[in-house]
């Protein structure tokens, strides 16, 4: 299993329940073949450039260990989620 880092940005006008739902979905996908090591909620920060007419976003960092299929599934889920405006997964 490899160590991965996921950073994703949720729309700043989304409700707390929506943010929790996104995080719970990520934890659910990781739990299939790995484990979540750490979740660090950075909160609402200013974006470097506007994305979809938003100038701020709610940032979350997730560190996890898993096989190679889990990041692909997380990427697929975050791409279809309309509340996530950006995400990036890297091998730590």
Image (tube, rainbow, N blue to C red):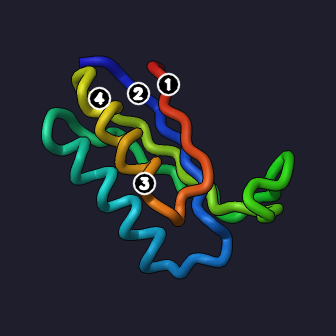
Closer to the observer: label 4 or label 3?
3
- Counting residues from the start of the chain, the first of labels 4 and 1 encountered is 4
Q: Quadrant of the N terminus?
A: top left
- Return the mark for residue 65: 4
Q: Residue at x 23, y 46 (%)?
A: 29
What is the crowding at mark 3: few (fewer than 14 residues within 10 Å), some, or many (at least 20)? Answer: few
Distance CA(mark 3)–CA(mark 2)? 21 Å
Which residue was labeled with disc 2? 4
Q: Where residue 65 appears, x then y in whole percent?
A: 29, 29
Look at the picture and state if 47 lies above or below 5. Answer: below
Q: Nearer the viewer, residue 55 or 65?
A: 55
The x, y position of residue 79, in whole percent, is 46, 48
Q: Is residue 44 or residue 77 the one in the foreground? A: 77
Q: Nearer the viewer, residue 9 or 65?
A: 9
Write down the residue under mark 1: 90
Q: Between disc 1 and disc 2, whose residue precedes? A: 2
- Mark 3 vs mark 2: give the one in front: 3
The answer to whether marks 1 and 2 mark residues whose Cβ atoms lie closer than 8 Å is yes
Pointer 4 local density, CA inside 10 Å: few below 14, some 14–19, many at least 20: many
Label 4 – label 3 distance at C-alpha:
23 Å
**Residue lying at 47% horizontally and 32% vertically, measured from the top left:** 5
On the image, the x and y values in percent for residue 80 come to 42, 54
Instruction: Determine contact: label 2, label 4, CB under 8 Å.
Output: yes
Residue linked to disc 3: 80
Mark 1–mark 2 Cα distance, whole angstroms, equals: 6 Å
């Amino acid at each position: 299993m490899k160590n991965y880092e996921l950073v994703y940005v949720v729309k700043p006008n989304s409700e707390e329940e929506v943010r929790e739902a996104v995080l719970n979905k990520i934890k659910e996908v990781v739990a299939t073949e790995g484990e979540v090591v750490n979740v660090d909620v950075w909160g609402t920060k200013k974006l470097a450039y506007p994305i979809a007419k938003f100038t701020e976003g709610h940032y979350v960092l997730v560190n996890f260990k898993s096989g190679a299929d889990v990041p692909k599934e997380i990427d697929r889920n975050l791409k279809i989620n309309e509340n996530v405006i950006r995400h990036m997964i890297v091998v730590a």
